[in-house]
Image (cartoon, grey):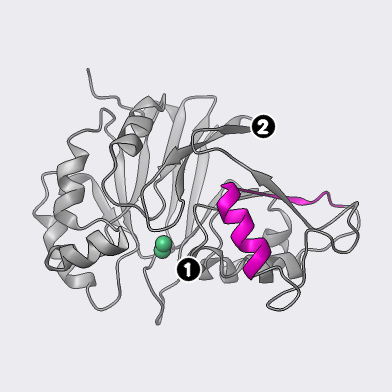
Amino acid sequence: MSLSVRILGASGGIGPNRRTTSILIDEDILIDAGIGVGDLTLSELQKIRHVFLTHSHLDHIGFLPMLADMVYSPDSPPIQIHALPATLKALREHVFNWVIWPDFTCLPTPAQPILEFRPIGSEEQVTIGSREVRALPALHTVPTVGYGVIHHDGMGFAFTGDTTSSEALWDALNALPYLDLLMIESGLPDEMDSLADLSKHYTPHRLSDDLDALRHDPRIAITHLKPGHEMAIRQQLQQSQYASRMVLLEGAERFELHAQNRTLKAG
Ligand SMILES: [Zn+2]
Ligand SMILES: [Zn+2]
């Protein structure tokens, strides 16, 4: 058994070969619905049964309306959209409001809609077959969670969402039973520290400091680099003592996690 993590988008902006955040877990679970969703074929889109949203920002939800419009099949149960209540409220009021897009939570019929909104608490979990998806508290400018995906056979993946330094997040990451791959942002370069503070994103220096708190020993997949600053962020991350474990995501990677690869730091 393995846990498949396919990165569809991992940029902090747009441009040639840059797509915003979206991750496909196995074939049926999508985390965030940024521009990367647009690369999936119709049959891949139709296999998605659960979408977990980290927060309401457009770079993470922008392609959810298009996804909903693509996947209708009279025999399929609704796609479950898991997110914080504040995120679901924002989607209802500002996106699926019949102005920006139709309300697919009551189409084609309220009894069997295309999307079903499922509120999740900031440390709640949902079991889907052999996998458990656990919300992780993050710290951003709007209510945000990350997600840990734990396979019962002993594999673990976590994505932090957009976040800055937060003790609760690192506590929650440490509480995961396994963590083979950690996808975390480093959105802005060190010299933009005050903007990172305002917009609540990580910089390479802050991230490197906080990684000291992690008791697991995962590969570290860096995401959400701001176009125009990618080179500076890359160079600053190379100074980190964790550089050898880092991979800077381009947005088209696939990771297959196997139980035997798991390592856990002592203590
Ligand atoms: Zn954001
Ligand atoms: Zn973002």
Q: Residue at x 16, y 47 (%)?
A: 208
Q: Which residue is mark 1?
A: 59
Mark 1 C-beta closer than 8 Å to ligand 2: yes
Q: Is residue 28 left or right of residue 215?
A: right
Mark 2 C-beta closer than 8 Å to ligand 2: no
Q: Nearer the viewer, residue 41 or 74?
A: 74
Q: Residue at x 21, y 49 (%)?
A: 207
Residue 30 seen: no
Q: Amino acid at mark 2?
A: Gly
Q: Which residue is mark 2?
A: 129
Q: Nearer the viewer, residue 32 or 145?
A: 145
- The x and y percentages for residue 248 are 28, 59
Q: Residue at x 33, y 28 (%)?
A: 174
Magenta stretch: includes residue 10? no
Q: Split into 4 quadrants, where in the image is the C terminus?
A: top left
Q: Residues within 10 Å of mark 1 (few under 14, many from 20)?
A: many
Magenta stretch: includes residue 88? yes
- The x and y percentages for residue 41 are 66, 67
Question: Based on the displayed image, in which of its 4 quarters is residue 141 positioned?
Answer: bottom left
